[in-house]
Amino acid sequence: MSKRLPASLALYRVGTRALTPLAGWLLHSRLKRGKEHPTRIAERRGESKVPRPSGPLVWVHGASVGELMAVLPLVDRIKARGFAVLVTSGTVTSAGLARQRLPHGAIHQFIPLDAPGFVDRFLDHWKPSLALFVESDLWPNLILAASERSVPLILLNGRLSERSFERWRKMPSAIEAILKRFDLCLVRTPSDAKRFGDLGAPRLSVVGNLKFDVPQLPVDDSKLAALARSLAARPVMAAASTHAGEERAVIEVHQRLRTTFPGLVTVIAPRHPERGPEIGALATARGLTIALRSAGKLPEAGTDIYVADTLGELGLIYRLAPVVFMGGSLVAHGGQNPIEAIKLGAAILHGPFISNFAEIYAALDGARGADLVADTQRLAQRAGAWLKDTDERGRVVAAAQKTVNALGGALDRTLTALDPYLVQLRLEHQSNA
């Protein structure tokens, strides 16, 4: 089949095979930067110490935390139907989330590097019966090799930004050859469907965005009670999933508001928790008192900035902060998902860089369920207004929750589309038993 591949994909296969000897150097470099798990490097070469479960195996792949969060309810439903589930992702933070949130018996592995030898080793071991790829993490060797082994491929929650669409248009034969390997592409919006269709996806269905159907984030009740006691009677605002450059703005907002709101605590939860000490140093340099959650600290009476530099605890923050600025949106990152915060009653502020969640924010802003803040001054104004006026804040939260509820349903529609494949797997297993 490789002879029939477009030249660009054939060259990609040859190039990644030739570069495979450099994989050790690449993984070691990533390990030093904290981007690989020190005891699970072998998984990136397609090796595993975990045995394959017996029977049909549904393989779900998502790039990182956001994709994994979107499909957790789907994984729960598939597992509840009696299927073995393998979940793969590519980041250390997503592995931590998988450890905390996957249902009992579901397996997590790091996705192998996209080199033919590693991909073959991975597929030889796991022998997936059905492969579900989330959003747009499309690794050519992985997809081609799975297709060549007759593994049905389905794209879930498909999304394609205008920027990615234009990039793929420069390689039309390559992306068409990849997309035609998919039995079905389940996409979020009509715009996504048009882009995927223009690139050559033959079978498309618009089912909505799985991220609207995520459940409330879980919480440890004892930790919630302890943090609530430490924040009792103090005004609180939070900045969630922040990126470099945004914390400085949030710290400035805190300084502007602290006079109007005595005792104000600003919680900063960085997207990458290892940046906690760096953020603490920024606040200390401005004369503010900080506490790091990673050091086991709770806010004290004099704490100005509480750095929540831990994994899997946004459920705590969203339950206790009535106003939340969603990070990744004041810098050119593309924004972060606001739905989890909305479901826990937070009023959402966001910056202008929201391309990753453009449809969600457009719906929220249009319904006055969130507010765009283009700079530090506007962020301070809106945060201050919502901290002061609980009625206005309540209206914003109600509008946001109504919007999110109205846009839900993608999980059920996705399961309906997957049903024929799951039934077929069960029938094949029964006939072979």
Image (tube, rainbow, N blue to C red):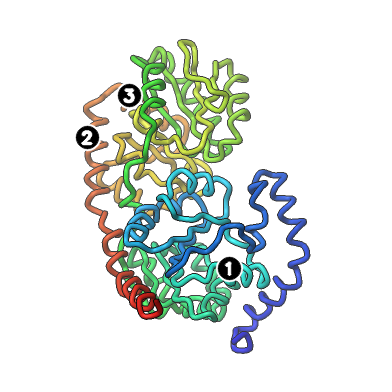
Are discs 3 and 1 less than 8 Å apart at CB? no
- Residue at the disc numbered 3: 387
Which quadrant is the N terminus positioned in? Answer: bottom right
Q: Can the viewer see residue 150 in this picture?
A: yes
Q: Which circle, 1 or 2, is nearer the viewer?
A: 1
Which structural element holds mark 1?
Answer: helix
Q: Position of residue 157 (x, y in %)?
A: 39, 62
Seen from the viewer's position, the closer of residues 179 and 365 is: 179
Image point (45%, 55%), residue name: 106
Left of 176 or right of it: where is 220? Answer: left
Between residue 252 and residue 414, name the one nearer to us: 414
Earlier in the chain: of badge 3 and badge 2, it is 3
Disc number for residue 395? 2
Whether residues under marks 1 and 2 lie with C-beta atoms below 8 angstroms apart, the answer is: no
Marks 3 and 2 sit apart, C-alpha to C-alpha, by 13 Å
Residue 300 on image: x %, y % = 47, 13
How far apart are the two marked residues, 1 and 2, measured between alpha carbons? 53 Å
Q: Residue at x 37, y 38 (%)?
A: 218
Q: Is residue 332 visible?
A: no
Residue type beneath disc 1: His
Residue 269 picture location, percent across and down: 49, 33
Q: Which residue: 59% across, 89% down?
A: 4
Q: Contact, CB < 8 Å: mark 3 with mark 2?
A: no
Q: Secondary structure at mark 2?
A: helix
In the image, 91 versus 281, the foreground residue is: 91
Which callout, 3 or 1, points to the residue nearer the camera? 1
Of 82 and 38, nearer the camera is 82
Question: Residue 125, which numbered label?
Answer: 1
Q: Which of the two discs, 3 and 1, labels the residue nearer the N terminus?
A: 1
Name the amino acid type tagged 3. Leu
The image position of residue 94, as x and y in percent, is 52, 48
